[in-house]
Image (cartoon, rainbow, N blue to C red):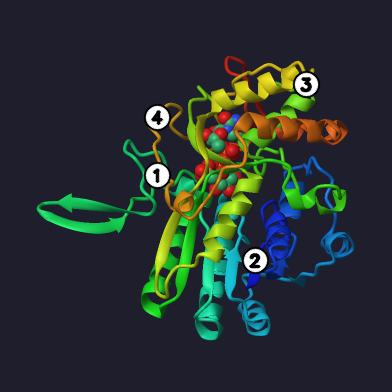
Amino acid sequence: MKILIAGIDGYLGWPLALHLSGRGHEVGGIDMYLRRKWVEEMSSWSALPISSMPERLVALKERHDREISFWEGDLTNYDFVEGIIREFEPDAVVHLGECPSAPYSMIDVHHAKWVQSNNVDSTFNLIFAMRDHRPEAHLLKLGTMGEYGTPGMPIPEGFFEIEYRGHKDRLPFPRQAGSWYHWSKVHGSNNIMFACKIYGLRATDIMQGVVFGTQTDEMAGDPRLLSRLDFDQAFGTAINRFCCQAVIGHPLTPYGRGHQKRGFLPLRDSMQCFTLALENPPEHGEYRVFNQFHEVYDIVSLANTVREVSSDLGLDVEVRHLDNPRMELEEHFYEPDHQHLLDLGYQPAHDVATEVRMMVGDLIAHRDRIEAKKDALVPDVNWSGRRSRVGFVGEQTVSTRD
Ligand code: USQ
């Protein structure tokens, strides 16, 4: 299959390109390196040193004798996107080319507007270029479990049967996103659902949980093939941040009471799930939704797992709660379905503790890089719109922008 990955330089995009090309698919990718720039803007860098895209492509050729087509450019430029769809003629398009950060979207009006317009525009461009030039192709779009929020009832995979005043229907499950970023994903989902209906496109919308991990099999043995691993307040996800905190002896930082629950999955499982969706496409005109995660955890349990594993590896780490910079429920019901991918054959690779052990082991070698940017570990982006560094629970906060 010919598969185009929008956002091939990112945390998920690069390992997915390696994985799919390893399975014999012909892979092409688009990127303009925005993730590298956003993380720099947050005064941080990847804990694992990563190669440039030209270096990655050379390493892939030397190590595995495989090639990937690459276009550098802006997904919000329709002519650029249309030109690539016409030239490459993909059978499937994976859309990972969006800004993935809730905190980044909450910084101020400029960041909120930019994240929403960038994410919605890039999706529109892919929809229309596919409609006009590859209407048979499958659009695999990265959504987020965060689109649903944390309702007080089980969460189905996209749709549910509901009876109201004597009438029954199958309707989209309500979205209650918790950041401007998460709302941008809702808008993208709605637009794709509508495009499938009116243009007969086919799409899989992946409601993915929080991804963590440093490794996939295809990277092994060649540091030039590693993917990035962020730990700053905006682009580092909870477990990745906890593992980086552990290796420099920084307290692990659950926000608030820390009983927020989320679905988590290792990076290697994310690759497996995307592949299953691509190799088992929907019917023409079908819009389907997969909830993509392995296990539900609360944040404090995760922090404790990272602490225990780190202690086995000789690291002395404590868990200290930070005042929560976000507006979110800190204790809630959370029971999302995730059967569709299991039905397609998803086999979870490891439990969280095993994956965390590998991560911490990998990160110890790069302790100096985390230490050098450790100020980026403590959040100062607040959902209230005030920019002030949050303190540990019970401590006074220090304003950084007043
Ligand atoms: N959290 C802490 N301490 C930290 C960092 C985060 O307690 O140091 C908490 C957050 O308050 C939140 C939970 O951990 O309750 C998850 O936060 P996160 O930063 O790991 O993840 P989130 O902001 O939700 O976003 C990440 C990805 C995003 C993806 C989403 C999936 O950045 O692209 O859409 O995970 S989900 O969380 O299921 O919406």
- Percent coordinates x, y for residue 114 in the rendering: 59, 58
- Percent coordinates x, y for residue 40 in the rendering: 77, 48
- Percent coordinates x, y for residue 259 in the rendering: 48, 25
**Tag in front: 3 or 4:** 3
Q: Secondary structure at mark 3?
A: loop
**Tag in front: 4 or 1:** 1
Using the numbered discs, state the Cα–Cα distance from disc 3 to disc 4 in whole angstroms: 33 Å
Instruction: Name the amino acid, label 2.
Output: Ala
271 horizontally vs 180: left or right = right
Q: Which residue is mark 2?
A: 6
**Tag in front: 2 or 3:** 3
Instruction: Name the amino acid, label 3.
Output: Leu
Q: Which residue is mark 1?
A: 337
241 horizontally vs 345: left or right = right
Q: Which residue is mark 4?
A: 332
On-image quarter of the C terminus: top right
Q: Secondary structure at mark 4?
A: loop
Check mark 2 vs ligand 1: CB closer than 8 Å? yes or no.
no
Q: Secondary structure at mark 2?
A: strand
**Tag in front: 1 or 2:** 1
Q: Residue at x 58, y 14 (%)?
A: 394
Decide if residue 100 is in sight here: no
Q: Are marks 2 and 3 in contact (CB under 8 Å)?
A: no
In depth, the one of 66 and 199 nearer the eye is 66
